[in-house]
Image (cartoon, rainbow, N blue to C red):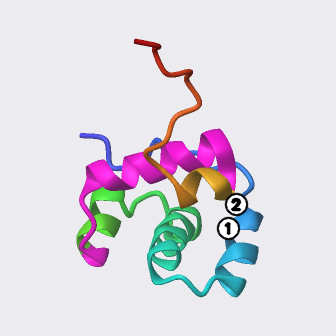
Amino acid sequence: MNTGRRTDIPDAAMIRVHLADERDAAMRLRLVLLNLVVELPASVTLADICRGMDVPASTAYVWLRAWRERGYAGLKHPTETLRPRAEA
């Protein structure tokens, strides 16, 4: 059983910068979760963090992907993609 996390987070210092200034509750929740992933030891799994914050793991993975791909802007709108939309 793997007890570690496969969650590398680029620009971790920027998470703390945004967290210090963020006033929107939904964004603070996202930033706090990402910051916990960065700050807690790898022995604390993402599932543990999600349980403690009452956030579904699938949602946390969406937030992680959004941060990796587009940083703060991606986290603000985590379900938007950069892929062009198919034209009908």
Q: Secondary structure at mark 2?
A: helix
Q: Is residue 72 visible?
A: yes
The residue lying at 55 percent from left, 70 percent from top is 31
Relative side of 43 to 77, left or right: left
Q: Percent from the top left, x then y, of residue 45?
A: 35, 58
Are circles 1 and 2 on residues that touch, CB within 8 Å? yes
Label 2, residues with CA under 10 Å away: few <14, some 14-19, many ≥20: some
Numbered range of the magenta stretch: 52-71
Q: Percent from the top left, x then y, of residue 26?
A: 44, 75
Which residue type carries mark 1? Ile
Nearer to us in this view, 29 or 77: 77
Q: Secondary structure at mark 1?
A: helix
The residue lying at 67 percent from left, 51 percent from top is 71
Which residue type carries mark 2? Ala
Label 1, residues with CA under 10 Å away: few <14, some 14-19, many ≥20: many
Indicate whether residue 69 is drawn in magenta.
Answer: yes
Pointer 2 residue? 12
The N terminus sits in image quarter:
top left
The residue lying at 54 percent from left, 46 percent from top is 66
